[in-house]
Every structure is written in C-alpha cells, then in structure tokens.
Image (cartoon, grey):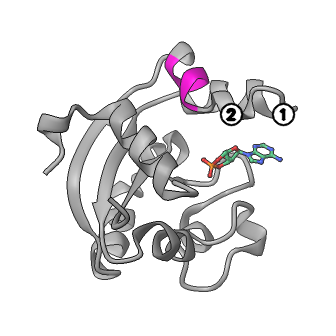
Amino acid sequence: MTNRTFTMIKPDATEKGSTGGILQMINEAGFRIVAMKLTHLSAEKAGQFYAVHKERPFYGELVEFMSRGPITAAILEKDNAVEDFRKLIGATNPADAAEGTIRKKYATSIGENAVHGSDSDDNAAIEGDFFFSKLEQF
Ligand code: CMP
C-alpha cells in the first residue's frame, strides 16, 4: 500500500482551533481522508508512538506535549502520499518551512509543530494501525 500516509494534528494546533484550516489544506492538496478520529493520547501511548525517539534529548518533552490535549489522527490517500504529504507539511522546524506549507502557517516551534507526517510507507502502515483497526480504514 504505497498510496497512504498517516497524520496527527497535534495538541498545539487543536488548542488554537486550527484543525479545520489544516484539514482544508489537506483536502485542497488532493488527499482523501480514509480514517479519522479526535482522541487524547495518554503519556504511555504517546511514548509508544514515538518510541523510535526514546534516546533523543527531546523525548520527554515530546511525550509531555503530545499527551497535553486532544489530537486528530487520520489516514490519508493520494498517489505518492508519503512524499507529497511531507512536502505539504514542510520542514520539522517551522523556521525552515517553505511558504504555503502547513507548518509555515500553523506551527510555533520545532517541538510544537502542528502536524505529524509519516516518513516512509512502512511507518505509515504501522502508525495508521496504531490508531485504527482495519474496519475503520476506508
Ligand atoms: P514529528 O514529525 O511528529 O516527529 C518527531 C517529533 O519530535 C517532531 O515532529 C517534533 O515534534 C519533535 N522534535 C523533533 N526535533 C525536536 C527538537 N529538537 N526539540 C523538540 N522536539 C523535537
């Protein structure tokens, strides 16, 4: 399944009421939403999701941030989804994000960067399955 990616609209963007604007940018860029939910990660679940970053100095801060409030998790479909979505969201650090990207418009800092996007097809499948059963993926 090379045409799907996974995203989260993070707690900072939820708090600011940016969810609708971000979903509009996602739709206008040609992505189809095939699964979506508003949920609130426990610290334990956020830690599991970002386990790959466990040794990084920012891991504790990341887990605290991601469990601070509700997120919107979604699976998106489009040709070349992983790469095209990473282009749409822009660089991890919003200071480096290109004009017209989601992070340029909505992110605050490298930590509070409004959205997550999978970095590979394999991780897109793993991350989507973390939040959604197969019956919830259309
Ligand atoms: P994301 O694309 O979700 O993947 C890992 C997350 O870790 C990243 O977005 C940021 O939210 C966070 N992150 C990456 N680098 C840093 C950093 N230097 N300081 C704080 N948080 C970071």
Residue at image position (69%, 74%) is 97
Q: Which disc is residue 52 wearing?
A: 2
From the top left corner, tell me how far across and down residue 29 is, in percent.
Answer: 35, 81
From the top left corner, tell me how far across and down residue 105 is, in percent.
Answer: 56, 72
From the top left corner, tell me how far across and down residue 130 is, in percent.
Answer: 39, 31
Give yes or no for residue 126 being in the magenta stretch: no
> Disc 1 versus disc 2: distance between alpha carbons?
9 Å
Residue at image position (59%, 67%) is 103
Q: Which residues, given as a range, are shown in magenta?
A: 45-49
Q: Is residue 44 left or right of residue 30?
A: right
Instruction: Kindly tell me whether mark 1's CB lies below 8 Å from ligand 1.
Output: yes
- The residue labelled by disc 1 is 56
Residue at image position (45%, 24%) is 41
Label count reads 2
From the top left corner, tell me how far across and down residue 84 is, in percent.
Answer: 47, 76
Residue found at the very far right of the displayed protein: 57
Residue found at the very far bottom of the displayed protein: 99
Quick one: SS at disc 2? Answer: helix
Residue type at the position of mark 2: Val
Residue type at the position of mark 1: Arg
Q: Which disc is residue 81 wearing?
A: none
36 vs 77: above or below: above
Q: Name the image quarter holding the N terminus.
A: bottom left
Residue 16 seen in this snapshot: no
State the residue in front, 26 or 112: 26
63 vs 27: above or below: above
Residue at image position (65%, 47%) is 112
